[in-house]
């Protein structure tokens, strides 16, 4: 066992600088595309995509209970017409909402389900096209959906919501069709049900970033322009912390370069825009994530000498740092995504574009730590595309993508959460002999549900007494005197990244 432990510790030292991900798992039928994924508080995943059934594109979904296999895909949209652009959200109670846009034979209509077995309902009115829906959820059964609606001349932004029920409100206009062309809305909801929607609006002079705020149970505010005057702005994204403090990012074109900017919302007020990318270089497709303390991580794609890199910058205690290049080499790195857990641990994923094929890659960053080495998440040699990323508050992470070689959706799990061993129990067995009585404490446990466990450690009164490999028996015995004082035993699981599970404790009272 000591030899095995030495080998395991050497392995730990060799891999601890590179984040580990589970092997890719295929979760969809062939001819599937546009995957999206979310996690609930317990690591249970829901993924959606569009899939071609031989006649039309339909929206499908699967669920993956933490530590178990994925379910069989279910159809969410009706056959007979094409459905596209699926998006989903999971509320604080674990309820799933999925939205998409479906052609009804005349126009595109935004539809939604509030469970994977529910019947789709129309959120938009089928008088003109409604496309590019987004959805966000907060407390139980509180969700807000937004989309682009066409009036024959311009697109404008509409919203619908449900507040504690499965009934969606009638759509309301967040912008006027007369104000210009409003496109690509995003929405976020905090744990109190307050919502912020954000989009870009072409006024005929410039393209500006606008936002509207909706306190829970109240009406939407008048749109407010939050971008720099006399500039063109695109690709807006937004994230919110549990207390309702929001951070938006977007690409600003100043006539010479494309700069990534940010603004924050707190107490009903937006801050002035701030540059977070290097002026003089071109940044595109920013993404943003915030933790429970309102620290933030932003990523974007940056063009340098005709190839693209992935840049990242963090905001800690309200102060943005210096951008860092996460990628190396002359390949093209595109489509970045970022997620953080409640403690500020971060995961970033992207697509690496090669001449022959593309791969999905990822890095991890413990809060106040350093970025890991790059991990290949997808299978080498199988062209992959369209990554999406989700992480929950405790640190579970999941990446989904399209395997172009298989034309199927695949997933891999990683992150910062390590499930503790289960069923950590101690049993006292009494052995009677002619002249004495012997007591034996028998301790056992079951394996952690997390992948890539390197070893388990057992402590007695805070002192390490045993290290056990996953291939060893999950059992040990201790002989003791009945008259000894109470003893505390603790066990943790440690994965190959050096991340520890929460401890499990048993207290043996010997009196």
Image (cartoon, rainbow, N blue to C red):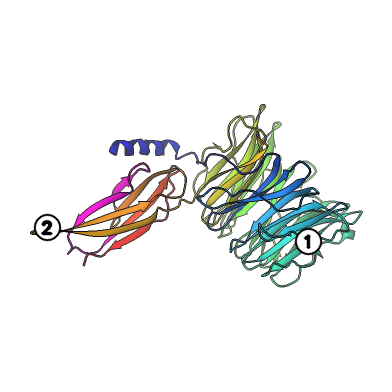
Indicate the secondary structure of the residue bearing disc 2: loop
Find the residue positioned furthest to the top.
Answer: 356
**Of marks 1 and 2, the one in the foreground:** 2
Q: On the picture, is 289 further left or further right than 22?
A: right
The residue positioned 64% from the left and 51% from the top of the image is: 288
- Label 2 neighbourhood size at 10 Å, few (<14), some (14-19), many (20+)? few
- In front here: 277 or 240? 240
Q: Position of residue 252 (x, y in %)?
A: 75, 48
Query: Which circle's residue, 1 or 2, is located before the other in the chain?
Result: 1
| Residue 486 higher or lower than 346, as above or below | below
How far apart marks 1 and 2 lie (CA) works out to: 77 Å
Q: Which mark is residue 170?
A: none
Q: Is residue 185 visible?
A: no
Return the residue nearer the eye: 112 or 216: 112
Q: Which residues are magenta?
A: 465-488
Residue wearing tag 1:
123
Q: Residue furthest bottom?
A: 217
Q: Which residue is mark 2?
A: 433
Q: Please state the horizontal and vertical placement of residue 3, each as a whole percent of the image.
A: 30, 35
Q: Residue furthest right?
A: 152
Q: Is residue 245 left or right of residue 448?
A: right
* Quarter of the rendering occupied by the C terminus: bottom left
**Quadrant housing residue 9:** top left
Q: Position of residue 359 (x, y in %)?
A: 62, 34
Q: Is residue 472 magenta?
A: yes
Q: Position of residue 71 (x, y in %)?
A: 59, 50
């Amino acid at each position: 066992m000591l030899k095995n432990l030495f080998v395991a510790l050497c392995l730990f030292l060799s891999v601890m600088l590179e984040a580990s991900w589970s092997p890719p798992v295929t979760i969809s039928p062939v001819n599937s595309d546009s995957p999206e994924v979310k996690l609930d508080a317990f690591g249970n995943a829901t993924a959606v995509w569009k899939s071609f059934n031989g006649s039309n594109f339909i929206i499908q979904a699967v669920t993956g209970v933490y530590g178990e296999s994925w379910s069989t895909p279910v159809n969410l949209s009706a056959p007979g017409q094409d459905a596209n652009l699926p998006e989903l959200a999971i509320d604080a109670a674990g309820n799933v909402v999925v939205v998409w846009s479906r052609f009804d034979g005349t126009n595109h209509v935004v539809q939604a389900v509030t469970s994977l077995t529910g019947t789709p309902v129309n959120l938009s009115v089928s008088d003109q096209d409604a496309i590019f829906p987004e959805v966000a959820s907060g407390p139980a059964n509180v969700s807000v959906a937004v989309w682009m609606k066409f009036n024959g001349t311009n697109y404008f932004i509409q919203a619908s919501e449900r507040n504690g029920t499965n009934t969606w409100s009638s759509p309301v206009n967040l912008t006027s069709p007369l104000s210009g062309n409003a496109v690509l809305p995003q929405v976020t909801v905090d744990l109190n049900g307050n919502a912020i929607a954000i989009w870009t609006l072409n006024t005929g002079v410039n393209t500006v970033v606008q936002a509207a705020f909706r306190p829970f149970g109240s009406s939407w505010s008048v749109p407010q322009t939050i971008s720099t005057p006399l500039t063109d702005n695109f690709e807006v994204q937004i994230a919110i912390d549990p207390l309702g403090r929001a951070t938006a990012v977007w690409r600003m074109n100043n006539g010479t370069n494309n700069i990534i900017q940010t603004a924050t919302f707190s107490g009903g007020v937006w801050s002035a825009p701030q540059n977070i990318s290097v002026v003089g270089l071109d940044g595109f497709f920013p993404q943003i994530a915030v933790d429970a303390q309102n620290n933030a991580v932003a990523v974007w794609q940056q063009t340098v000498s005709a190839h693209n890199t992935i840049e990242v910058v963090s905001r800690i205690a309200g102060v943005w740092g210096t951008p860092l290049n996460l990628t190396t080499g002359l390949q093209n790195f595109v489509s970045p995504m970022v997620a953080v857990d409640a403690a500020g641990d971060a995961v970033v994923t992207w697509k690496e574009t090669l001449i022959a094929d593309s791969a999905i890659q990822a890095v991890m960053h413990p809060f106040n730590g350093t970025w890991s080495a790059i991990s290949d998440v997808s299978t080498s040699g199988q062209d992959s595309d369209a990554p999406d990323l989700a992480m929950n508050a405790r640190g579970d992470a999941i990446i989904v993508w399209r395997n172009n070689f298989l034309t199927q959706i695949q997933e891999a799990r990683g992150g910062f959460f390590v499930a503790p061993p289960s069923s950590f129990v101690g049993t006292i067995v009494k052995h009677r002999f002619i002249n004495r009585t012997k007591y034996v404490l028998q301790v056992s446990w079951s394996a952690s549900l997390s992948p890539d466990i390197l070893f388990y450690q057992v402590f007695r009164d805070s002192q390490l007494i045993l290290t056990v490999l996953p291939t060893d028996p999950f059992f040990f015995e201790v002989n003791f005197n009945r008259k000894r004082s109470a003893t505390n035993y603790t066990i943790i699981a440690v994965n190959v990244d050096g991340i520890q599970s929460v401890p499990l404790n048993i207290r043996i009272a010997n009196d």
